[in-house]
Image: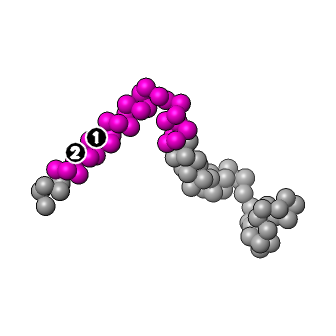
Amino acid sequence: MADFAVWLGLALLAASTGLWAWRRWAPTSFWYVIGFPVKALVVYGTWRAVASGCGLSRRRRRWRWTFPGFPGLGG
């Protein structure tokens, strides 16, 4: 079990060092591959609470769930 913990620690150290180096020397590609998707998920996950707190939301209608991709039909 201790052997597994050592290998896991080394793998985490190597991954974190690699991610740090990638962010340091290639920030544009790091942003497109890691940074933007993480930021988009954070915004998506917190948007309901933010919009509700700012008074930007209202109750969803039932039809909105039925036709989400069609403009003018609740999308």
| Residue 64 on image: x %, y % | 78, 68
Dominant SS in magenta: helix
Whether residue 3 is situated above or below residue 67 in the rendered picture: above
- Judging depth in this view, the residue of 16 and 59 nearest the camera is 16
For the residue pair 9 and 61, the one nearer the viewer reads as 9
Q: In which quarter of the image is the C terminus?
A: bottom right
Do the residues bearing badges 1 and 2 touch, measured as CB atoms within 8 Å?
Answer: yes
Mark 2: amino acid = Leu
Q: Observer-nearest residue: 69 or 4?
A: 4
Residue at 41% over, 32% down: 22
**Is residue 64 placed above or below 10 in the rendered structure?**
below
Specify the quadrant of the image occupied by residue 32: top right
Residue at horizontal 38 percent and vertical 37 percent from the top: 19
Decide: is 69 above or below 31: below
- Residue type beneath disc 1: Ala
Instruction: Give the position of the N terminus as an image quadrant.
Output: bottom left
Q: Position of residue 46 (x, y in %)?
A: 57, 53
Kindly identify the residue that appears in the image at 28 percent across and 46 percent down.
12
Q: Position of 2 compared to 40: left or right?
A: left
| Numbered circles on residues, count | 2
Q: Is residue 46 visible?
A: no
Count neighbours of disc 1 (C-alpha within 10 A) and say few if under 14, some if 14 to 19, many if 20 or more.
Answer: few
- Check disc 1 and report its element: helix, strand or loop: helix
Residue 62, percent from left and from top? 77, 73
User: Which residue is under mark 1?
Assistant: 14
Instruction: Locate residue 9 relative to residue 66 in the image: left or right.
Output: left
User: Looking at this view, is 64 or 2 the one in front?
Assistant: 2
Question: Magenta stretch?
Answer: 6-35
Is residue 65 shown left or right of residue 29? right
Q: Residue at label 2?
A: 10
Mark 2: give few (<14), some (14-19) or many (20+) Cα within 10 Å: few
